[in-house]
Image (cartoon, helix red, strand yellow):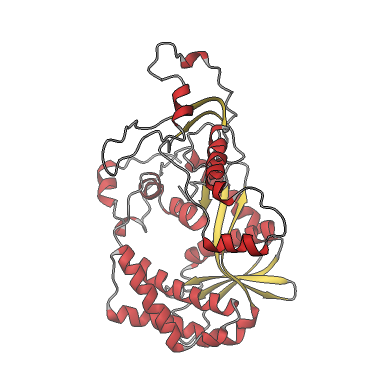
Amino acid sequence: MEEYEDETAYAPSGCVSFMTIHQSKGLEFPLVLVGSMGAVPRKQYDDLDVLLQERFYHRPPFEPMERTKTVDFWRLFYTAFSRAQNMLVLTCQENVANGRGQKNVPSCYLSTTYGRLADWRSLDFNPAEIELASIKPVNLKNEYSFTSHVLVYEGCPQQYRFFKELEFAPVRKNAILFGTLVHQTIEDVHKTVLRGEEGRVTDEQVQVWFRTNYHHLTKRERVYLTPVAQEIALAHVRRYVQRERHNWNRLQDAEVEISLLKDAYILKGQIDLVRGENGSVEIIDFKSERKPDLVGDREKLDRYRRQLQIYAHLVEEQLGQTVSRMHLYYTSEEAGNPYVSFPNNKHAVNDTIAAVDAVVKRIEGKDFSMAARPAKACPECDLRSYCDMNFVARKC
């Protein structure tokens, strides 16, 4: 109840919304159902509040402190009851206390209000006679990210259908765990530097962050790395820290979540690192895989370039900052240059946004057809047996 399903539309029109009374403040609905009929006023103050009022208040209290709990109780339920535009329904499992540990439902504070209302079983009550306010047209927009949605769909629409639409879980998680472990530990480094505590970024502290992250990740995912793989992952982080210490002063932000409202959907992304100077910024995305060959792996690099272009577009549109360059940083690179850099070409960015629009349109239309099975994705795909039996080529 404390987390909205969608922060951008936590009470969308045309949908049934479950929320606390506090969350409903300022909202109205044609029909409102209120529970908690067993509630009673509860003391909201302690001895410190009494002391502060007696010694430091320079004017008479707004209301007697001993009555505050009752007044706050009715303020709360006034808020709940007044959310209804046309019909208010009070609901509970009625109960009369007849033993220890039991309580009256509704409570003595709400029983009078509850008893005045028509029972839903009453023959005199006809809800069809109550005219409800019209529902406004609903225009809920889905969120899409380039890495989690667009790239998955472009790689294989059927994989997207199973993993995103049908919520199947991929079997192979070890490679994901390795990258996440490196990423989270580097994130700890960045956050410490951004707090102005770069002196804490020692090799001993890096190891503490690394082990803590590994413990939490394995506990959550139930997937593990061999001791050798753990040492390799730790070496990635150590190398990065040693190489980039002289650039700490250029760090501006890390793990930046950003989104842009489009006509038909919401485009979102999370930028690993933003650094800059002289009025412009550079964005960096970290990769724990082997640095690709600039010629032989051009297709993979093109996908990553497009990812960075999306991030650059979001930064410039939402934050109003000029992005001068975009970088991939390969933590696995031992001796050579860990960077692969791209200029921020506005025409190329516009082409990428147009391609994303086209992919989202197909996803929204539930179009998962393929002209042919993707040769690179199929051999290692968890779903290949299903496609062996069911695949039918369709024109995209």
Residue 99 in the image: x percent, y percent? 26, 39
**Coordinates of residue 233 in the picture (x, y in percent):** 38, 78
Residue 153 to residue 86: above or below: below
When the figure is inspected, residue 366 is found, relative to residue 177, above or below; the finding is: above
- Where residue 24 appears, as percent x and y from the top left, is 55, 40
Q: Is residue 236 left or right of residue 138?
A: left
Residue 208 appears in the figure: yes
Q: Residue at x 43, y 81 (%)?
A: 236
Q: How many marks?
A: 0
Instruction: Please tell me whether residue 368 is drawn above or below residue 172 in the rendered image.
Output: above
The residue nearer to you, when weighing 146 against 35, is 35
Q: Quadrant of residue 273?
A: bottom right
179 vs 37, nearest the viewer: 37
- Relative to 191, does residue 266 appear above or below in the rendering? above
* Residue at image coords 65%, 61%: 315
| Nearer to the camera, 364 or 206 | 206
Instruction: Using the rendered image of the protein, determine whether residue 141 is visible from the camera's viewpoint.
Output: no
